[in-house]
Image: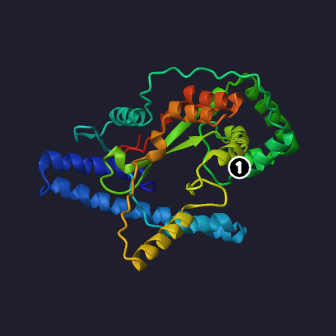
């Protein structure tokens, strides 16, 4: 819990040691247990007073978005994130280094591509326009506000506030990356943050892993995505509704309901099959993805940029603060 102080965490550790050494019925344990309960109450009170004071200031300064964001943080259901994680054999890991290695192992297995083929650079004589200034300006406007930054600590709001000069700088940088097909090191670094889902939170599999990537890199990524959209739209089957502009899975739900109704009317048997892939987006084969892009005759420049963003990428895991406060 983010509001528990280091002093309280120390008391919790002392209580644990007292229980281990003297037993749960001992006076030492009871004294530490009382101390912990009082400390938690005081920490909670201090946290709420500080949080409510911040909300009140936001209200007085007419910062509506921040005020309601603060209220939502207080009102929403809280799901605790545990620092202790189990290894593959079910053993509970408590040391930071062990926990970090377990997360590294889990993420490495999740994103491992077992294809042994080496991805070669795609070559072609076809010409394609470099990113234009108007595309860069459009991409910057599309950057979402209020999102966490990765290690470079550059938020989307900072990029948007850079104005015309910022557009010129990023346009020049995007053209350089486009020509050389090489991404800056900071742009291909990701920070993985585990978000708890449900079930046993000591199992890595019960966390959704999100990646924080550089907001600056999203400028060129949005340009690439925009250029790909038209080409992919021509190739994708009309039966696919998800991940398409102006269409969604609601269309398929409507179609499915219509089919069910027609089958009922005609007393016809209907068999439905549903496939749920565990962490589907984390298990995409980069080799297969590149092969599909080639099959769709996407431009070699775009394919190489996508390929290089993945093959030269680096990541690190952001650990949940441990109960020892380290």
Rendered residue at 64%/63% (across/down)? 66
**Which residue does the numbered mark 1 point to in the structure image?**
143
Residue closest to the far right: 164
Q: Can residue 49 be seen in this snapshot?
A: no
Q: Nearer the viewer, residue 66 or 314?
A: 314
**The C terminus - image quarter:** top left
User: Where residue 219 sits in the image (x, y, percent)?
Assistant: 72, 41
Q: Nearer the viewer, residue 111 or 248?
A: 248
Q: Nearer the viewer, residue 60 or 208?
A: 208
Residue 107 falls in image quadrant: top left
Rendered residue at 38%/33% (across/down)? 109
User: Where residue 121 sits in the image (x, y, percent)?
Assistant: 63, 21
Label 1: few (<14), some (14–19) or many (≥20) C-alpha neighbours in 10 Å: some
Rendered residue at 58%/61% (across/down)? 248
As drawn, 157 above or below 98: below
289 left or right of 77 in image: right
Rendered residue at 38%/64% (across/down)? 41
As drawn, 210 above or below 183: below
Colour pattern of the rendering: rainbow
As drawn, 202 above or below 172: below
Residue 87 falls in image quadrant: top left
Q: Can residue 34 be seen in this snapshot?
A: yes
29 left or right of 73 in image: left
Task: Count how many numbered circles sit on residues in the image.
Answer: 1
207 left or right of 154 in image: left
75 left or right of 309 in image: left
**The N terminus - image quarter:** bottom left
SS assignment at label 1:
loop
């Amino acid at each position: 819990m983010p509001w528990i102080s280091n002093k309280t965490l120390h008391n919790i550790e002392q209580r644990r040691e007292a229980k281990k050494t003297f037993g749960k019925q001992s006076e030492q344990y009871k004294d530490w247990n009382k101390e912990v309960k009082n400390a938690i109450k005081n920490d909670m009170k201090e946290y709420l007073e500080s949080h409510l004071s911040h909300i009140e200031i936001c209200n007085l300064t007419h910062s509506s978005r921040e005020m309601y964001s603060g209220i939502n943080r207080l009102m929403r259901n809280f799901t605790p994130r545990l620092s202790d994680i189990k290894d593959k054999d079910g053993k509970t890991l408590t040391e930071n280094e062990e926990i970090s290695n377990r997360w590294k192992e889990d993420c490495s297995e999740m994103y491992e591509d077992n294809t042994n083929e080496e991805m070669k650079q795609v070559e072609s004589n076809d010409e394609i326009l470099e990113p234009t200034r108007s595309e860069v300006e459009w991409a910057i406007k599309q950057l979402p506000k209020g999102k966490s930054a990765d290690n470079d600590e550059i938020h989307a709001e900072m990029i948007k506030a850079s104005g015309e000069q910022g557009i010129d700088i990023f346009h020049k940088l995007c053209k350089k990356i486009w020509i050389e097909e090489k991404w800056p090191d900071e742009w291909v670094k990701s920070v993985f943050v585990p978000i708890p889902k449900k079930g046993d939170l000591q199992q890595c599999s019960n966390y959704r892993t999100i990646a924080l990537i550089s907001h600056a890199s999203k400028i060129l990524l949005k340009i690439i995505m925009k250029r790909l959209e038209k080409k992919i739209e021509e190739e994708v089957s009309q039966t696919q509704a998800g991940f398409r502009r102006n269409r969604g899975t609601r269309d398929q739900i409507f179609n499915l309901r219509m089919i069910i109704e027609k089958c009922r009317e005609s007393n016809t048997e209907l068999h439905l099959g549903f496939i749920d892939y565990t962490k589907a987006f984390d298990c995409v084969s980069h080799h297969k993805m590149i092969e599909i892009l080639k099959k769709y005759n996407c431009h070699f420049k775009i394919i190489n940029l996508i390929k290089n963003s993945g093959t030269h990428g680096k990541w690190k895991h952001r650990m949940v603060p441990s109960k020892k406060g380290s």
